[in-house]
Amino acid sequence: MKSLWSAFVKLLVLAVIGGALLATVAVLVANRQLPSLDALTAFRGTSDYVPLREFPRDLTDAVVAIEDERFYLHDGIDYVGVIRAGVANLSDELSQGASTITMQVARNFFLSREKTYTRKLYEVLLSYRIEHAMSKDEILELYMNKIYLGQGAYGFADAARTYFGKPVERLTLAECAMLAGLPKAPSANNPVVNPRRARQRQAYILHRMLELGKISRGEYDGALLEPMRLK
């Protein structure tokens, strides 16, 4: 019995070592095949690109609060967020996902939507590369300009005109929270198509901003009471 147990332990150790070696080789091979980040630099030079300073602070706070509240703390992969999202999603369909803003930038610029382990590996490696090549504000700026927000709108400046008929810098807190709810599900949370669900998502985001100290109780109450005025 003792010899069988010893053999089992040896096999287990060999399996772990073999798995680690295979994972290392996979990472090395994938790392060599990663695309250049030149596409990010080129995109930042386009004529309609909006610098981060021109987005309302309420909008960037709302986006970070719901999409990646630890954005300025992690290195591209938020392991704390992954665990928290997994637990929260068991009971709350409005909770945020586990993908960081950096991972979404990597996916939106370079990867497909297919759900495979290979694509996820590329997403992780690209996220680390982007984090080392750019500042946090530059990454957030790319996200704010690139993300699809429904109704044919890409980026929050485009979405402000599409949904509310105004430049992004004139958005109210309530409007910022509503637009911040679109990245997760541009169709389901769309105020044109599904105003009730859009309102629910807006309220949830405003509550997260209140919990994180980004807005006051008075601002929160006022935003909830603001009527939705779509274009």
Image: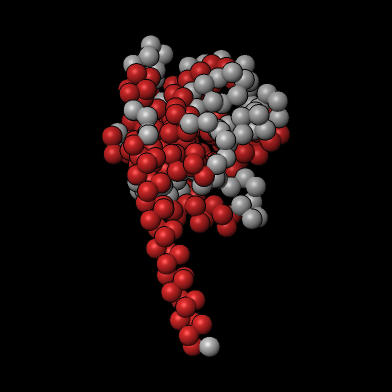
In the image: residue 121, left or right of residue 136: right
Q: How is the image coloured?
A: secondary structure
Q: Is residue 217 above or below residue 35?
A: below
* Residue at x 61% of width, y 29% of height: 186
* Image location (x, y in percent) of residue 171: 50, 24
Give the x, y percent position of residue 100: 45, 42
Q: Residue furthest top?
A: 47
Q: Quadrant of residue 148?
A: top right
Asked if one can make out residue 170 in the rendered structure from this viewpoint, the answer is no
Who is closer to the viewer here, 174 or 181? Answer: 181
13, 89: nearer the viewer: 13
Q: Position of residue 184 (x, y in %)?
A: 57, 36
Q: Pick the residue in front: 94 or 110.
A: 110
Seen at 47% across and 20% down, the residue is 157
- Is residue 231 in sight in this rendering? yes
Q: Quadrant of the C terminus?
A: top right
Image mark count:
0
Q: Residue at x 42, y 49 (%)?
A: 78
Q: Position of residue 108 (x, y in %)?
A: 48, 29
Q: Determine the residue located farthest toward the bottom in the rendered image.
A: 1
